[in-house]
Amino acid sequence: MIRVLLLASLLFAVPGACVSAPRTDPAQLSAGSFTLDPAHASVTWRIRHMGLSWYTARFDTAEASLEFDPDDPAGTRLTAIVDASSVSTGDQDFDATLRGPAWFAAERHPQIVFRSTLIEPTGETTGRVHGDLTLKGVTREIILETEFYGGLFNPLEGRQALGFGADVTLDRTDFGVGSLPGNLIGDEVRIQIEAEFLQGED
């Protein structure tokens, strides 16, 4: 038993010891195609409930692709797709309501899609990602306020990895989402995204 425990400790300790701090200088990172690591990604959203609290929920299923060029960071291209039916509040009955026609209309519009059109650096690790968001059949231009956490070699996956965080605020009425009046739920929806990308295809 002691030998088993020692071996397990070594197996867990070695990968951790090989991980260096993320590099945030794009010139030190690898160019290429990256895909979202769904095990290390989240899309959460918040909306005011009768002015009393920020009601918080999420989408459980998303995929994304990133074309990254360290010689031209502003030319990086991002496409992200969220499964509208994966909306998750912790209440299955309410989830079914949100998937319905008055809200996300997931049966008719199963995908929420974002495609970047321009990346505007605003600092050493920050930028604005301009792009088109299609939600419930309506397309609007939005801007993601983004922070680049850096990149490194992920020894657990055996691939290069990049990390980002992003925030955006939307008006739900721009997309025809929600049938309740503004005094019950707010029009403003705050979305927070955390994402790790792995180089190459799965």
Image (cartoon, rainbow, N blue to C red):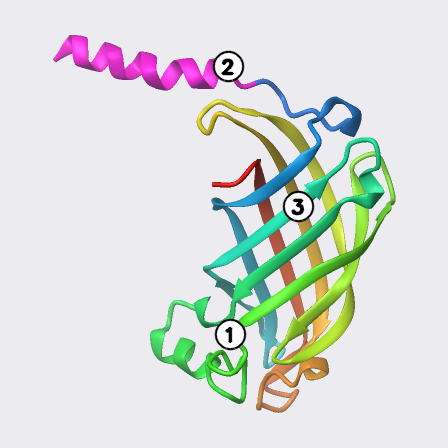
Q: Quadrant of residue 162?
A: top right
Residues under numbered marks 3 and 2 in contact, where contact means CB atoms less than 8 Å apart: no
Three-letter amino acid code of the residue under disc 3: Leu
- Which label's residue is closer to the chain start, 3 or 2? 2
The residue identified by callout 2 is 18
Left of 33 or right of it: where is 27? right
Residue highlighted by disc 3: 66
Range covered by the magenta-colored residues: 1-19
Residue 110 shows which numbered tag?
Answer: 1
Pointer 1 with pointer 2, Cβ within 8 A:
no
Nearer the observer, 71 or 186 = 71
Distance between the alpha carbons at the discs numbered 1 and 3: 22 Å
Rendering coords of residue 136 (x, y %): 61, 80
Amino acid at the residue labelled 2: Cys
The residue sitting at 71% across, 31% down in the picture is 31
> Main SS of the magenta segment?
helix
Q: Which mark lies nearer to you, 1 or 2?
A: 1
Around disc 2, counting alpha carbons within 10 Å, would you say few (fewer than 14), some (14 to 19), or many (20 or more)?
Answer: few
Label 1 and label 2: CA atoms lie apart by: 41 Å
Mark 1 secondary-structure assignment? loop
| Residue drawn at point x = 78 percent, y = 36 percent | 125
Vertical placement of residue 175 versus 61, above or below: below
Does dot 2 land on a helix, a strand or a loop? loop
Q: Position of residue 44 (x, y in %)?
A: 55, 60
Q: CA distance from mark 3 to mark 2?
A: 25 Å
Q: Position of residue 32 (x, y in %)?
A: 67, 35
Indicate which disc residue 188 carries.
Answer: none
In magenta stretch: residue 62: no
Amino acid on which disc 1 is placed? Pro
Identity of the residue furthest to the left in this view: 1
Q: Is residue 88 visible?
A: no
Q: Earlier in the sequence, mark 1 or mark 3?
A: 3
